[in-house]
Amino acid sequence: MTLRAVVKGVGHYLPERIVPNSEFEKTLDTSDEWIKSRSGIERRHFAADGETTSNLATKAALAALADSGLVADDIDAMIVATSTADLTFPSAATMVQAQLGMNKGFAFDVQAVCAGFVYALSNANALIVSGQAKRVLVIGAETFSRIMDWTDRGTCVLFGDGAGALILEAQEGTGDKTDRGILSTDLNSDGRYKDILYVDGGVSSQNTGFLRMQGKEVFRHAVEKLAATAHTAMDKAQISAEEVDWVVPHQANIRIIKGTAKKMNVPMDRVIVTVQDHGNTSAASIPLALSVGKSEGKIKPGDVVVTEAIGGGLAWGSVVLRW
Ligand SMILES: CC(C)(COP(=O)(O)OP(=O)(O)OC[C@H]1O[C@@H](n2cnc3c(N)ncnc32)[C@H](O)[C@@H]1OP(=O)(O)O)[C@@H](O)C(=O)NCCC(=O)NCCS
């Protein structure tokens, strides 16, 4: 008998305000055409004043609970992947716990920037296969609009706010690749690249700071490292490119998504793409794409799904699962 972390439900929430590329033309030397052609982004959602990351996360969690037919008290553990928690402490996860009225179990945040959701999934998988939790709520939630330098056209047009949530449940499997649930994980980081994507402030630096990025450098690392981690995770799960039903990549840039899919030998009609509507929502982008992919009838029970993500650190990784 092998314990597997099987998807029970998925959901997402996007703030009401939708900002099209044309909005930026009013204040910056940029254009809808430049943003679309370089990144694939057409619009993004921004949180309202006072609407925090834990508020978005709670709404996504409620949607995932509804999709699973579960209530908050059915959950033993919660992991929130975020780099934009409401407060320095407590964790966004405990704030979501309070908003859900979930008074048991344990909750904590994981911070691996845009790779946060694959890190959180891998941690949730470890909790389940080691018997420490039966049902884990895994959330990716961000308000990156709060760390944008609105005068920097190279970054502020690329990011958005949102949240997605997945519920994993311990189920018995046979131990081979026909099992439903998480089949393999691969995580990596390399702090030598900390200066190509970072926020120039923080608690210990005594200011909030803004996101700073050397876009070309990040791009250079992204395709190569994403394809490598996806291949490693697929090899561990003994899944070939032909067996992959859906690649669900971190949604940063359509050119990175296409380049990575090509290196993985998976055609674009088997890739879930939401970057045009959401922009880069960091740790929220993969659960948002999973939720959209499911609601559009693309991702179905039994499908093999490969997620891959890279972000500040650099930190990157991949999770292979059977839906
Ligand atoms: C940021 C990114 C879209 C820029 O695309 P690019 O093709 O590399 O563009 P370049 O960096 O060569 O910039 C070309 C020019 O466009 C300019 N430019 C940058 N942002 C612009 C904008 N919003 N509008 C118009 N021009 C812009 C640059 O200033 C540069 O001008 P210059 O040649 O006069 O210096 C791209 O590098 C990228 O997506 N990188 C990865 C970013 C990412 O995904 N980060 C998150 C990972 S989690």
Image (tube, rainbow, N blue to C red):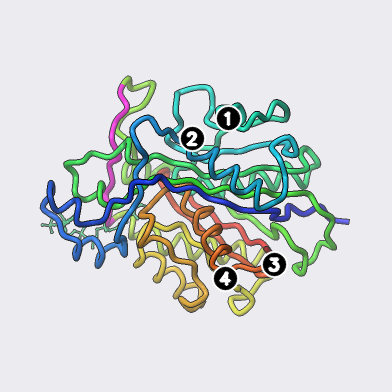
Q: Is residue 14 above or below residue 275?
A: above
Residue at which label 1 appears: 99
Q: Closer to the camera: disc 4 or disc 1?
A: 1
At horizontal 64% and vertical 37% (from top left) the residue drawn is 78
Mark 3 or 2: in front is: 2
Q: Secondary structure at mark 1?
A: helix
Q: Which residue is at 75% across, 45% downward?
A: 128
Ligand 1 within 8 Å, label 1 CB: no
User: Which badge, 3 or 2, is on the more N-terminal residue?
Assistant: 2
Residue 301, percent across and down? 69, 67
Where is residue 188? Give x, y as percent.
Answer: 53, 50
Q: Quadrant of the C terminus?
A: bottom right
Q: Name the amino acid, label 2.
A: Asn
Instruction: Provide the residue designation for mark 2.
Output: 55
Q: Quadrant of ligand 1?
A: bottom left
State the separation of the CA atoms marked 1 and 3.
30 Å
The x, y position of residue 169, in whole percent, is 75, 49
Q: Is residue 149 above or below residue 282?
A: above
| First along the sequence among labels 2 and 4 | 2
Q: Quadrant of residue 42?
A: bottom left
Q: Residues within 10 Å of mark 1 (few under 14, many from 20)?
A: some
- In the picture of the structure, the residue carrying the numbered disc 3 is 301
Local crowd at mark 3 within 10 Å, few (<14), some, or many (≥20)?
A: few
Is the residue under label 2 in contact with that under label 3 (CB below 8 Å)?
A: no
Let me know if residue 208 is in the magenta part.
yes
For badge 1, the amino acid type reads Gln
Going by the numbered disc 4, the residue's amino acid type is Lys
Region of the chain picked out in magenta, as a range:
207-216
What's the CA distance linking mark 1 and mark 2? 8 Å
Which residue is at the front of the view, 260 or 181?
A: 181
- Going from N to C along the chain, the mark reached first, 1 or 3, is 1
